[in-house]
Amino acid sequence: MDQPAARRARRGPSAYLSGPGIALGLAALIPLAFLTVFFALPVGGMLARGLWPEGRLDLSAVPEVLGRARTLRVLTFTLVSSLAGTVVTLLLGIPVAFVLYRLRFPGRTLLRAVVVMPFVLPTVVVGVMFRSLLSDGGPLGGLGLDGTWVPILLAFVFFNLAVVVRTVGGLWEGMDRRAEESAATLGATPWQVWRTVTLPALAPGVISAGTLVFLFCSTAFGVVLTLGGLRYGTIETEIYLLTVQFLDLQGAAVLSVLQLVAVVAMLAVAARARSTREQALRRVDVQASARRPRRDDTPALAVTALVVGFVLLPVGTLVARSLRVGQGWGLAHYRALTDPEATNALRVSVTEAMANSLRTAVDATVLAMVLGLVVAVIVSRRPRRPGWARTVSVLDGVFMLPLGISAVTVGFGFLITLDRPPLDLRTSPILVPIAQAMVALPLVVRTLAPVLRSVDPRQREAAATLGAGPWRAAWTAEAPVLARPLLAATGFAFAVSLGEFGATSFLARPDRPTVPVVIYQLISRPGADHLGMALAASVLLALVTVVVMGVVERLRVGSVGAF
């Protein structure tokens, strides 16, 4: 051992963390500055328009808005539907995560891509899909579910299964199987092994996934707007209606504040629950951890088959309807996608919009990954001093806030606050990838942070004791574990950016629309041809997403850390 390393070893592990700790603290300023300028400032500007209408604080709208019977109904439905959607998604997603990440069988990569696909479909399209599926004349029209709350719940589960499968599966696939096998050898039943060994190890991932799903359900916009009508609405749709249709900015601001407070409270509870269950995991080669299916895997395999069928049924309906031309079948709607003169509803062809979507998604993914990796490294550390530990916990919650704020609030906030020097960006195309990166950033953090937290700190300390510098010790311990989740997060961020609709609908320029915006414009126009083109564009978007996720999954095959 060289002399400097020997001196560091005598001073203890804390000596190795002083330099990197300062560097991480400085690095945290970058995402914080990004969050301040492109989230806090727009949201604050929107709230100021509602609560400081004439340059002074006016809270007279608060009791009036909260006292409305409609507000109470919206709040109740938001809470109940989001909770139900989270529970059902977890119950279905955890067995699927086990099958797709712990079992080895042909076609597993394709099934992963299929399960992920719904998460990136435009919300308005999914609403149309489920309405077509459950309405009179649809494949399941005889169930009488159209017009009820059930389609909204089904759409919540349809969207968010990918979150549970990818988050829990990413943690599960690298978990050492020997602890479970040892418990079974000592006489524990499969249920006892699951309850005492597997579930505690997966708890951080389950809590993270559940938190994300609840946030996505409570902030769902297009689905509820399409399927809920006037009878069922969430806080998100109510903010949209108050802002766009009734120009009630005070009412929208009150609900935005209420939404923000609820999200902060929920994130605090989730962070508390997650921190009490985090533990270091002994991670192994994912190829060694996967095994072939056995007879006792039948229930999980059956749930997976049910879920895959549940995902493919509305998608199949979408594909079939996109091929329906008049009373026959054909590719006319797909040919129209390349023709800018096919409809006067658009200024560019759908294929040009697809090129815009791909370019924007690449920019947003790069931005989200750079910022998300920095944030994940920071919030995954476990400072020994209580004050620093609380600071890290607060930072973890702060970077989740964009998930809990209405896209309407953020979109309008961009337009009314970034409209003057030095940040006059109203007409700049850079706003779209920034808004999409803001949406993808919490997802990247939630994908990477649980994996980094599962790394035993003693591995870094052992590497440091052997003479490695602080950065090399961290790289040696964490890089092999991080490589695969990093690829998953990249694919997720790219897919989410491709399908993002809420904020993009306010910010995309008419001559540079993205595909989700084009689909919404087509659906909003009357006529079978517009609907057919919208469905064909949805199929194209879904196909691109499946190919992207399939390539990512294929590249991930191999030893740990291989790319």
Image (cartoon, helix red, strand yellow):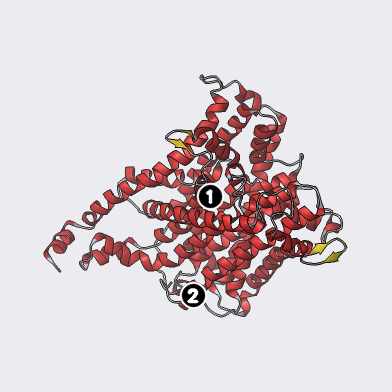
Q: Position of residue 308 (x, y in %)?
A: 67, 67
Reading the chain from its start, which is encountered first: label 1 or label 2?
1
Along the line of sight, the residue nearer the viewer: 174 or 256 = 256
Along the line of sight, the residue nearer the viewer: 440 or 357 = 357
Q: Position of residue 410 (x, y in %)?
A: 55, 39
Along the line of sight, the residue nearer the viewer: 498 or 23 = 498
| 311 on left or right of 260 | right
Along the line of sight, the residue nearer the viewer: 541 or 81 = 541
Quadrant housing residue 319 = bottom right
Compared with residue 193, is residue 235 higher up or lower down, i.e. above or below?
A: above
Q: Quadrant of the N terminus?
A: bottom left
Residue 318 visible here: no
Q: Position of residue 373 (x, y in %)?
A: 41, 56
Task: Determine the residue located farthest toward the front in the rendered image.
Answer: 341
Q: Which mark's residue is nearer the viewer, 1 or 2? A: 1
Amino acid tagged 1: Gln
**Residue drawn 86% across and 55% down?**
136
Q: Position of residue 250 (x, y in %)?
A: 61, 27
Residue that label 2 marks: 557
Residue 415 visible here: yes
**Crowdedness near tag 1: few (<14), some (14–19) or many (≥20) residues, C-alpha within 10 Å:** many
Q: Quadrant of the C terminus?
A: bottom left
Q: Which mark is residue 455?
A: none
**Crowdedness near tag 2: few (<14), some (14–19) or many (≥20) residues, C-alpha within 10 Å:** some
Q: Which mark is residue 436?
A: 1
Q: CA distance from mark 1 to mark 2?
A: 28 Å
- Confirm or deny contact between disc 1 and disc 2 (CB under 8 A): no
**Residue drawn 43% across and 56% down?**
449
Per the image, label 2 sits on a secondary structure element best described as: loop
Amino acid tagged 2: Val
